[in-house]
Image (cartoon, rainbow, N blue to C red):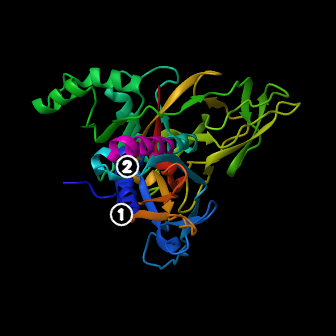
Amino acid sequence: MANTLLTTSKITNESLMVLENNLTFAKGVTRDYDDQFAVSGAKIGDTINIRKPARYAGRTGATMSIEDHTETSVPLQLDTQFGVDVTFTTKDMTLSLDEFSDRFIKPAMATVANKIDFDGLKLYSAVANAVGTPGTTPTTLKTYLQAGAALDNEAAPRDKQRSCIINPVAQVEIVDALKGLFQSSDKISDQYETGTMGLAGGLKWSMDQNISSHTVGPLGGTPLVNGASQSGSSLITDGWTASAASRLKKGDVFTIANVFAVNPQTRQSTGSLRQFVVTADVSSDGAGNATIPIFPAITTSGAFQTVSGSPADNAAITILGAANTVSPANLVYHKSAFVLGCADLMLPGGVHKAARASDKQLGMSIRMVQQYDIVNDRMPCRLDVLYGWKAVYPELACRVQG
């Protein structure tokens, strides 16, 4: 029986399915698809607003104390349009869908999926919580359990939505470390035969070659807090090497002496120093002063309290990792920590065919536009996605230094 001509819609739907199957990091995060653009289509720069729930301080005693209900939203900008352009003949269009997918769709979608995951994993630089030693690959499960404890201290739900994504070297070490644990024989067999892990330590494990590496800044000097009772999203410091560019790099993590993290619900100290992440590169001035932009903000009271108290003047600052150390930023995270947003791209006129495939549940949309080349009897086409990443609750993630 002769094959029928493949349709643009059929190809586009197959592309969406392959794209979903190829995503690694994105499988464990929140997905947000905005269908408000379904008719006219979205453009780069369009924004999806993601609502965050209100938080309350509560009261003690019988007297009512009404608190303001304040819901916040985080703008997620759809700032990346990425695609693959291919061409095939009308003869290629008569292939079976499986043949066509193997030759054209799967290679193209692997490229798209790789780019989406690569961009998402760069969000590590928004995460303040970190365990392990930069430059040293963890060799036991304990380090990952410590990352899980960091999520517990941030009140991350234990709802089977926690994931761990690591680079190939870290996977070798942890698979070897866990190969002798008591568990079902089929799981041990799967580890042995595939060299990968499934579910362990309350985490869904996966490996991704796109894990980002972080290089600690050159540092220099003996940094101290400059001024007591500071609060907010920046910290005034001194004691750095004078007039030095980029003493700290975006993504560097540090602690402040006697400034402890608090549980977001009870506001009680966890007993661990609060870790802060630098949100932009920092240089020192001629006197060795530097103002560091940080996350989380130093908040000492109220429903959004983050620390046990403000840092003291001249409190010591300790940066995680030695100067210029390179470390893979493996991640343990709850699904709510990150969001991948997507929207429908516009369908242009004046072309041979154009189609979109979208799935609100999967949170993905892909567009295919096709034009016939009458001279060469070819069908140039483009496959595009429009997406954006955001660390909505970076406190619900923890970096595992490698």
Q: Which residues are magenta?
A: 100-116
The crowding category of the residue bearing disc 2, from other C-alpha atoms within 10 Å (few below 14, some 14 to 19, many at least 20), is few
Whether residue 115 appears in magenta in the rendering, the answer is yes
Query: Which residue type carries mark 2?
Result: Lys
Residue at 46 percent across and 40 percent down: it is 398
Give the quarter of the figure containing the N terminus: bottom left
The dominant secondary structure in magenta is helix
Residue at 49 percent across and 24 percent down: it is 133
Residue at 38 percent across and 43 percent down: it is 106
User: Could you tell me how far apart the alpha carbons at marks 1 and 2 are, in whole angstroms?
Assistant: 35 Å
Depicted 65 relative to depicted 320: above or below = below
Query: x, y percentage for residue 285?
Result: 85, 34
The part of the image, by quadrant, that contains residue 49 is: bottom right
Depicted 381 relative to depicted 237: above or below = below
The answer to whether any part of residue 95 appears in the image is yes
Q: Which one is earlier in the sequence, the residue at label 1 or at label 2?
A: 2
Query: x, y percentage for residue 156?
Result: 39, 51
For the residue labelled by badge 1, is the local secondary structure a helix, a strand or a loop?
Answer: loop
User: Most extreme residue toward the right, as rendered?
Assistant: 286
The residue indicated by pointer 2 is 91
Depicted 391 relative to depicted 360: above or below = above
The part of the image, by quadrant, that contains residue 16 is: bottom left
Query: Which residue type carries mark 1?
Result: Gln
266 or 185: nearer the viewer: 185
Query: x, y percentage for residue 110?
Result: 42, 41
Q: Please state if 84 lies on the left or on the right of 145 as rendered.
A: right
Dot in front, 1 or 2? 2
The answer to whether any part of residue 73 appears in the image is no
What mark, if any, has residue 361 been given in the picture? Answer: 1
131 or 90: nearer the viewer: 90
Query: x, y percentage for residue 337?
Result: 46, 51
For the residue labelled by badge 2, is the local secondary structure a helix, a strand or a loop?
Answer: loop
